[in-house]
Amino acid sequence: MTANILIVEDESDIRELIGLTLAGNGYLVREAANAAEARRALADELPDLIIVDWMMPTTSGIELLREIRRDEVTRDLPVIMLTARTTDADITHGLDSGADDYLAKPFSPAELASRTRALLRRARGHGPDRTLRAGAVQMDDDAHRVTNRDGQEITLAETEYRLLRFLMRNPDRVYSRAQLLDHVWGRNAFIEERTVDVHVLRLRKALGAGGVEGLIETVRGAGYRLSTA
């Protein structure tokens, strides 16, 4: 599946260069010129990775990064810090504030693309074959394909796919309906919490048709979890 990347950069020419570089490497790109636009973009849809400039007016990239790390919904998103500040102290400060990687301006578009690929691989928990595994299910997120232990493909609608992907990335942890709505649908999705139950049911039926039972558990009064036990 094509990764969605949010670029947060106040200089339009640099933002355009980053966007063209990433789009040319097959990524879907959204842009924000400041922290306020970035917050709205994150509320609309969670990206797979964020590239944020340090030096921005009003709210700096470091401040925005700290906000991202404090928020349960966004705290695990991979972030590349992009900046002209390149001293050892600056790099340490950026990484200690929550950046996963640090790229100095001026940067090589090829290096940016390479670092983006590497960070996405790490963030997805992929090995060399770029797959996620849980119990009898295997997901190749690049190919947008889910299979059972025998290699039989399990057909999922897009929402069920995204729900399964989120749960596979966070196994053995209980999520409430509200949390799943935030993580899978986005905070600005005006959907009844009971809708989550419908999609969980559909996901279970699809997995069951592929011979996979009991992967998604209901935790009474709390929510749902993907069990690896």
Image (cartoon, grey):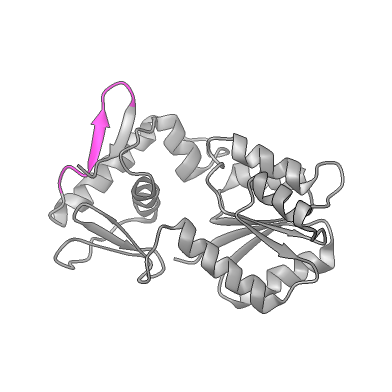
| Residue 13 to residue 176: above or below | below
> How far from the left and from the top, in percent, is residue 51?
67, 58
Q: Main secondary structure of the magenta part?
A: loop
Viewer-nearest residue: 130 or 139: 130
Q: Which residues are magenta?
A: 213-222
| Residue 218 drawn in magenta | yes
Residue 147 on image: x %, y %: 23, 63
- Res. 53 in view: no
Query: Residue 104 appears in which quarter of the rendering?
Result: bottom right
Q: Residue 53 location in percent, x, y? A: 76, 56
Q: In what quadrant of the picture does the C terminus appear? A: top left
Q: Is residue 67 left or right of residue 131?
A: right
The foreground one among 143 and 113 is 113
Q: Is residue 62 left or right of residue 77?
A: right
Q: Is residue 160 among what the camera can see?
A: yes
Residue 220 in which image quadrant: top left
In the rendered view, tell whether residue 169 sits above or below residue 111: above
Total marks shown come to 0
- Give left or right: position of 190 versus 29: left
